[in-house]
Image (spheres, grey):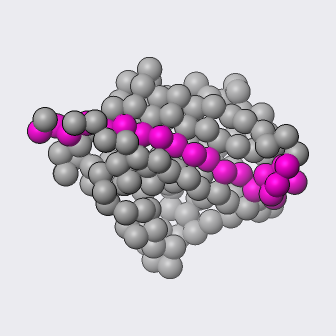
Amino acid sequence: MIRVGIGYDSHRWQIGRKLILAGIEIPSNSGLLGHSDADVICHAIGDAILGSISEGDIGSHFPPNDPRWKDAPSTVILSKICDIARKKGYRINNMDVTVILEHPHLQKYIPEMIDSLSKIVMIDKNRISIKAKTNEGMGFIGRGEGVAAMAVVTVKCEND
């Protein structure tokens, strides 16, 4: 049986932090504010995986008030979410991600981000899609206040 999950995350820009997306440091004059490293792509994918296996959301497993996750790499959190899925008998089949930000332009980093995610979730790169979009100057993203990401993930039950 194939199951589907949808994930979403957003974070504010913060001067003095590194911009980490899909586990890759992207050159930028600011990063994203969050309890962990605020990697919106990993967080959206994690929520999508958890949703697909009926395990709630990332905050219920990795609470923002838990000091263990302070400044933690979101790749570690995503890897632990994949472990939860595997223990329940699921394997990730496909991922489609859209990250929405006005700057910096991400096109040249997408192959490296896909490679990073492929290693974390242990699926072939051809099963991962990442798209970068702007918000055409509209809303909090368009005003340069933050970044958002959405993800759709399919999983397959190993026991089917």
- Which residue is at the front of the view, 87 or 28? 87
Residue 89, percent from left and from top = 18, 45
**Is residue 130 visible from the viewing direction of this image?**
yes
Magenta residue span: 138-159
Residue 34 falls left or right of residue 69: right
Question: Is residue 105 placed above or below 85 in the rendered structure?
Answer: above
- Which residue is at the front of the view, 13 or 68? 13
Residue 135's quadrant in the figure? top right
Residue 118's quadrant in the figure? top left
Residue 72 falls left or right of residue 142: left
The structure residue drawn at horizontal position 70% and vertical position 27%, both measured from the top left corner, is 107
Magenta stretch encompasses residue 154? yes
**Is residue 121 visible from the viewing direction of this image?**
no
The structure residue drawn at horizontal position 56% and vertical position 53%, both measured from the top left corner, is 8
Residue 98, percent from left and from top = 61, 38
- Which residue is at the front of the view, 86 or 5? 5
Magenta stretch encompasses residue 132? no
The structure residue drawn at horizontal position 47% and vertical position 40%, both measured from the top left corner, is 152
Residue at the far top in the pictured view: 126
Residue 78, percent from left and from top = 42, 51
Give the number of marks. 0
Residue at the far left in the pictured view: 159
The structure residue drawn at horizontal position 59% and vertical position 56%, both measured from the top left corner, is 9
